[in-house]
Image (cartoon, rainbow, N blue to C red):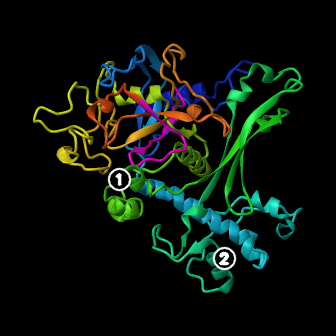
Amino acid sequence: MKKNLIILAIVVILIIAAKPIGELVGVSKRSVFNKGFVEANPYGMVFIKRGSFMMGANDQSPFSVVKDKSINVTVDAFWMDETEITNDEYKQFVAWTRDSIIMRALIEDQSLDVKERQKYTLYNDKNNPFDQLSPEQLKGVRLNWKAKIPWSSKDTVYQRIFSALNYQGSNELGSKKQLDPGKLMYKYEWINYDQAALAGNKLNVNTGAYPKGATARVDSSYINELGYIIDTTINRPLITRKDLISMKIVKVYPDTVMWIRDFQYSYNDPKMRMYFTHPGFTNYPVVGVTWEQAQAFCNWRTELFNSANTYGGQDYRLPTEAEWEYAARGGRRLAMYPWGGNYLRDSKGCYLANFKPTRGSYTDDTGATTMKVASFMPNDYGLFDMAGNVAEWTSTAFINAQSPLVADMNPNFQYAAKQDDSSVLKRKVIKGGSWKDIGYFLQCGVRTYEYQYESRPYIGFRCVRSFNGD
């Protein structure tokens, strides 16, 4: 028996080592026992396998609106957050933005010792000394996140920096000092593939050049001398791939006044003051976040993952309407609601989601406004709150009838509205219904919209990530 095991081991070694010389074998380190790269499960996300379903509303509209035609479509596999992004998770983004502002202020403070300033950076170019970099060059220096911010320092230099960037307020994010929410700004960039896809902007693969006279219409942002964010749209000559990049600066702190603005003549002041900051709302879905802020969050989350992993993953992003609806149905081809049935109550008469059952009776389903995420049972994919609690942003642009336009493979009508475009082009599809909506909006196939620059106390979001594989 032992002799047979030795022979088997030798045979295995020979098979592994036997790569044919001069043949097409690829460049990956593979063997007959190695099936290649396997993607790890993203934390807090659920895998949604690829498949097909009937996309569109199952029932007629109570508002006598002509519904879009239902179509049979196929959706690729992807990962999706099992719950909406919570206040606690969004606070990580806000805290990161706060810390990056403080660290950059320490880098740019010329009164500090050079070694003290440089410890907050990853800059190590000996040919260009750190202390001789221009203000513009300093803005491009990468931060060293292993360096600790001296929150408790008594040094007058740090006190001066903090006084310029902070106000003495409540300890909302666990730091000794708290930034003015109006100064919490995040800059992110993206490639305008819609501009690259224009017929007049087709790259010549033989010359590596774009057509003469080609231009790209992109967005840009800057902060003026008064500290205000100025958004502009520019048409720049298309010479290199970099000319396709748009840039936006976004204030990341959620809108807390929305509770009063959207529900006037009611006493919602406590909600307005405490919803995002109080520990009692830690595991509630974040609201008051615009579509643009959600996009910024996805960009930050992608950078956070890629900076900590050898193999970068697909970008975190908002789901398309088709992905969201496919995931909500939980593998049931014609499910009206995420739980699969055609009714809003279970066999015991209990409501299955957080919504507005009857006029003025918000608490019949045990919730008044938002509730903790995962307060109700998940659907068959393991996704919570795909109906009710808060409606959710998608990446899809809203038009009344999209089914005649979209493909039947990964359908999506996505219009990259520029800053100077009309407001009607900045409408984004929201799905799932919320705590303030009637039962109709909880249906998987029902769609409505909101403008991408608006924030509401009943709209949140969750992220998805495309799957690297079959």
In magenta segment, residue 467: yes
> Who is closer to the viewer here, 19 or 414?
414
Taking 347 as reference, is 408 above or below it? above
Measure how far apart labels 2 and 1 are at the Cα level. 34 Å
Amino acid type indicated by mark 1: Tyr
User: Badge 2 is on which residue?
Assistant: 161
Mark 1 crowdedness (10 Å alpha carbons): few <14, some 14-19, many ≥20: many
Visible residue check, residue 27 = no
Furthest residue to the left?
Answer: 348
Image x and y of residue 447, in percent: 41, 28
Query: Per the image, is 66 magenta?
Result: no
Q: Nearer the viewer, residue 317 or 286?
A: 286
Magenta stretch, residue numbers? 448-470
Which residue is labeled 1 in the image?
284
Per the image, label 2 sits on a secondary structure element best described as helix
Q: Residue at point 34% right, 24% down?
A: 331
At 47% from the left and 58% from the top, the residue drawn is: 91
The secondary element bearing badge 1 is classed as loop
